[in-house]
Amino acid sequence: MSQQEFWLSGPIAHVPVLLQPSAHALLQSVREIKEYLIDFPEEKLWLKPFGRAAIGFHLQHLTGVLDRMLTYAQGKPLSTNQFEFLKNEGNATSQKSSMEMIVEFESKVQEALSFFKTVPESSLTEVRTVGRKKLPSTVIGLLFHAAEHSQRHVGQLLVTISALKE
């Protein structure tokens, strides 16, 4: 990578100190996806090498998970549209290009950063619940998970791209 990683670039203005690592990781995810998918052939977007998830799935899932974690962090239930998006993650019939899905993820990351700027540090340990089972978490737990989950899928995406470019 030609650019310095976000975590070495200093704080992001107006993002609480405890959310800086999550913000950096999300920005890094966007940068890496863009770099990894340069010149990637669109006809391979939905191939599943070795039975693993397709590039298209990872791109959809990155956006979907971040959207859901932001909703839970705000103490809200998922909407009908979010459930529909979840149901269709990995569905190749969306007919979206990799660039369209990257733009959607980048937009969701910008939405996340805007949200981070509104979160008082005193609220980070507030209890939040996840899913229909209402599993316990906290605001910071959800926002951290959104970032680390994104990084995990970016890593998987890189391996899949490498296997498909051969």
Image (cartoon, grey):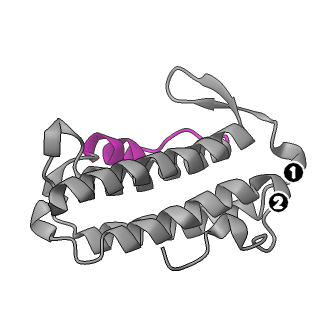
Label located before the other in sequence (1 or 2):
2
Whether residue 61 is visible: yes
Q: Secondary structure at mark 2?
A: loop
Residue at the farthest left position: 43
Residue 91's tag is: none
Whether residue 45 is visible: no
- Crowding at dot 2, Cα within 10 Å, few <14 / some 14-19 / many 20+, comes out as some
Image point 31% across, 51% down: which residue?
Answer: 159
Picture coordinates of residue 161 (x, y %)? 25, 58
Q: Secondary structure at mark 1?
A: helix
Q: Which residue is mark 2?
A: 16
Q: What stretch of residues is rendered in magenta?
A: 74-88
User: For the residue marked with disc 1, what is the amino acid?
Assistant: Glu
Relative horizontal placement of residue 152, taking residue 19 as reference (left or right): left
Spatial CA distance of label 1 from label 2 is 6 Å
User: For the residue marked with disc 2, what is the amino acid?
Assistant: Pro
Quadrant in the rendering for residue 111: bottom right
Front residue (pair 54, 65): 54
Front residue (pair 161, 136): 161
Residue 121's tag is: 1
